[in-house]
Image (cartoon, grey):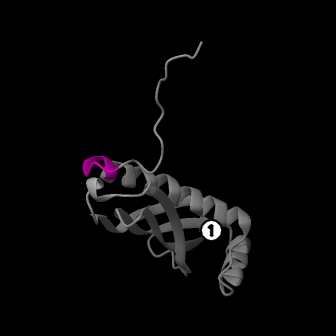
Protein backbone atom coordinates (compact mmCIF):
# COMPACT_ATOMS: atom_id res chain seq x y z
CA UNK A 1 0.00 0.00 0.00
CA UNK A 2 1.21 3.45 -0.93
CA UNK A 3 -0.22 6.92 -0.52
CA UNK A 4 -0.48 8.68 -3.87
CA UNK A 5 -2.68 11.58 -2.79
CA UNK A 6 -3.67 13.40 0.37
CA UNK A 7 -5.55 16.65 0.72
CA UNK A 8 -7.66 18.52 3.22
CA UNK A 9 -11.09 19.63 2.04
CA UNK A 10 -12.27 21.41 5.18
CA UNK A 11 -10.42 22.91 8.14
CA UNK A 12 -12.36 24.51 10.97
CA UNK A 13 -11.27 25.64 14.43
CA UNK A 14 -13.56 27.44 16.83
CA UNK A 15 -13.29 28.77 20.36
CA UNK A 16 -16.70 28.49 22.02
CA UNK A 17 -15.87 30.21 25.32
CA UNK A 18 -12.99 31.92 27.06
CA UNK A 19 -10.67 29.99 29.36
CA UNK A 20 -11.69 32.28 32.24
CA UNK A 21 -15.27 30.98 31.88
CA UNK A 22 -14.26 27.33 32.49
CA UNK A 23 -15.42 25.95 35.81
CA UNK A 24 -14.39 22.32 35.23
CA UNK A 25 -11.21 20.51 34.23
CA UNK A 26 -10.73 20.62 30.46
CA UNK A 27 -11.02 17.22 28.72
CA UNK A 28 -9.71 16.72 25.19
CA UNK A 29 -11.14 13.99 22.95
CA UNK A 30 -10.09 13.10 19.42
CA UNK A 31 -12.06 11.11 16.89
CA UNK A 32 -11.54 9.73 13.40
CA UNK A 33 -14.33 8.73 11.04
CA UNK A 34 -14.19 7.28 7.53
CA UNK A 35 -17.64 7.80 5.97
CA UNK A 36 -16.66 6.74 2.44
CA UNK A 37 -14.35 4.25 0.73
CA UNK A 38 -14.49 3.69 -3.00
CA UNK A 39 -12.42 2.49 -5.93
CA UNK A 40 -11.16 5.19 -8.28
CA UNK A 41 -10.30 4.83 -11.96
CA UNK A 42 -6.59 5.37 -12.60
CA UNK A 43 -7.13 7.87 -15.42
CA UNK A 44 -3.77 9.47 -16.23
CA UNK A 45 -1.98 7.48 -13.52
CA UNK A 46 -0.44 4.30 -14.86
CA UNK A 47 -0.46 1.66 -12.16
CA UNK A 48 -1.02 -2.08 -11.97
CA UNK A 49 -2.55 -1.64 -8.55
CA UNK A 50 -6.09 -0.52 -7.76
CA UNK A 51 -6.67 2.92 -6.26
CA UNK A 52 -8.90 3.37 -3.25
CA UNK A 53 -10.19 6.77 -2.19
CA UNK A 54 -11.00 7.31 1.48
CA UNK A 55 -12.91 10.34 2.71
CA UNK A 56 -12.19 11.12 6.38
CA UNK A 57 -13.06 13.43 9.23
CA UNK A 58 -10.81 14.15 12.19
CA UNK A 59 -12.04 16.04 15.22
CA UNK A 60 -10.67 17.39 18.47
CA UNK A 61 -13.27 18.35 21.09
CA UNK A 62 -12.40 20.35 24.17
CA UNK A 63 -15.04 19.65 26.82
CA UNK A 64 -16.94 21.22 28.46
CA UNK A 65 -17.74 23.11 25.23
CA UNK A 66 -14.54 25.19 25.21
CA UNK A 67 -13.45 24.66 21.60
CA UNK A 68 -13.38 22.26 18.67
CA UNK A 69 -11.25 21.46 15.65
CA UNK A 70 -12.74 19.76 12.60
CA UNK A 71 -10.71 18.56 9.65
CA UNK A 72 -11.98 16.72 6.57
CA UNK A 73 -10.05 15.33 3.67
CA UNK A 74 -9.45 12.61 1.13
CA UNK A 75 -6.65 10.06 0.72
CA UNK A 76 -5.76 8.06 -2.40
CA UNK A 77 -4.01 4.75 -1.74
CA UNK A 78 -2.74 2.16 -4.20
CA UNK A 79 -3.54 -1.42 -3.20
CA UNK A 80 -2.96 -4.80 -4.82
CA UNK A 81 -6.12 -5.80 -6.74
CA UNK A 82 -6.79 -8.88 -4.58
CA UNK A 83 -6.54 -6.85 -1.36
CA UNK A 84 -8.62 -4.01 -2.86
CA UNK A 85 -11.46 -6.43 -3.63
CA UNK A 86 -11.42 -7.66 -0.02
CA UNK A 87 -11.39 -4.09 1.35
CA UNK A 88 -14.35 -3.05 -0.82
CA UNK A 89 -16.22 -6.28 0.00
CA UNK A 90 -15.88 -5.65 3.75
CA UNK A 91 -16.73 -1.96 3.28
CA UNK A 92 -20.23 -2.95 2.12
CA UNK A 93 -20.76 -3.89 5.80
CA UNK A 94 -18.94 -0.66 6.91
CA UNK A 95 -15.91 -2.69 8.06
CA UNK A 96 -12.25 -2.71 6.97
CA UNK A 97 -9.49 -5.32 7.20
CA UNK A 98 -7.31 -4.57 10.24
CA UNK A 99 -4.08 -3.98 8.27
CA UNK A 100 -5.77 -1.46 5.97
CA UNK A 101 -7.65 0.27 8.81
CA UNK A 102 -4.47 0.70 10.87
CA UNK A 103 -2.53 1.98 7.85
CA UNK A 104 -5.32 4.44 6.97
CA UNK A 105 -5.91 5.68 10.53
CA UNK A 106 -2.18 6.22 11.11
CA UNK A 107 -1.99 8.43 8.00
CA UNK A 108 -5.04 10.43 9.10
CA UNK A 109 -3.74 10.73 12.66
CA UNK A 110 -0.28 11.87 11.62
CA UNK A 111 -1.29 14.47 9.02
CA UNK A 112 -4.36 15.79 10.84
CA UNK A 113 -2.72 15.97 14.27
CA UNK A 114 0.10 18.09 12.85
CA UNK A 115 -2.40 20.45 11.22
CA UNK A 116 -4.50 20.61 14.42
CA UNK A 117 -1.41 21.34 16.56
CA UNK A 118 -0.48 24.23 14.27
CA UNK A 119 -4.00 25.68 14.47
CA UNK A 120 -4.20 25.20 18.25
CA UNK A 121 -0.91 27.05 18.65
CA UNK A 122 -2.14 29.91 16.42
CA UNK A 123 -5.31 30.36 18.49
CA UNK A 124 -3.58 29.79 21.83
CA UNK A 125 -5.53 26.62 22.71
CA UNK A 126 -4.08 23.95 24.98
CA UNK A 127 -2.42 21.38 22.70
CA UNK A 128 -4.36 18.13 22.35
CA UNK A 129 -1.12 16.12 22.41
CA UNK A 130 1.52 16.73 25.09
CA UNK A 131 4.73 18.07 23.60
CA UNK A 132 8.11 16.74 24.75
CA UNK A 133 9.73 18.87 27.43
CA UNK A 134 12.73 18.89 29.75
CA UNK A 135 12.24 18.46 33.47
CA UNK A 136 14.59 18.96 36.34
CA UNK A 137 15.97 15.68 37.63
CA UNK A 138 14.49 14.59 40.96
CA UNK A 139 17.02 13.65 43.63
Give the residue at the far top of this rendering. 139
Q: Quickly name the residue at label 1.
A: 49
Q: In the figure, is residue 95 to the left or right of 136?
A: right
Q: Quadrant of the C terminus?
A: top right
**Quarter location, residue 49:** bottom right
Measured as percent of width and height from the top left, residue 52 is found at 56, 73
Measured as percent of width and height from the top left, residue 125 is found at 32, 51
Q: Nearer the viewer, residue 90 or 3?
A: 90
Measured as percent of width and height from the top left, residue 123 is found at 25, 52
Q: In the figure, is residue 124 to the left or right of 44?
A: left
**Quarter location, residue 9:** bottom left
Q: In which quarter of the image is the N terminus?
A: bottom right
Residue 18 visible to the viewer: yes
Please give the name of the residue rendered at 32% of the width and 65% of the height, measured from the top-left corner. Answer: 11
Give the residue at the far front of this rendering. 23
Give the residue at the far bottom of this rendering. 92
Q: Which element carries disc 1, helix, strand or loop?
A: loop
Please give the name of the residue rendered at 74% of the width and 73% of the height, measured from the top-left corner. Answer: 82
Tell me, yes or no, whether the highlighted magenta stretch contains residue 122.
yes
**Up/down of 60 relative to 84, above or below:** above
Tell me, yes or no, whether the highlighted magenta stretch contains residue 14.
no
Please give the name of the residue rendered at 41% of the width and 64% of the height, measured from the top-left corner. Answer: 64
Q: How many marks?
A: 1
Q: Give the range drawn in magenta.
A: 120-125
Mark 1 crowd level (few <14, some 14–19, many ≥20, 10 Å Cα): some
Q: In the figure, is residue 118 to the left or right of 101?
A: left
Amino acid sequence: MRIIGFNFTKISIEKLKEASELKEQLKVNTKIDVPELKEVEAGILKTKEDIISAKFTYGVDYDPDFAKVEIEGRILITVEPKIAKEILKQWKKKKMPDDFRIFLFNIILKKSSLKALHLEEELNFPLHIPMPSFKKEQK
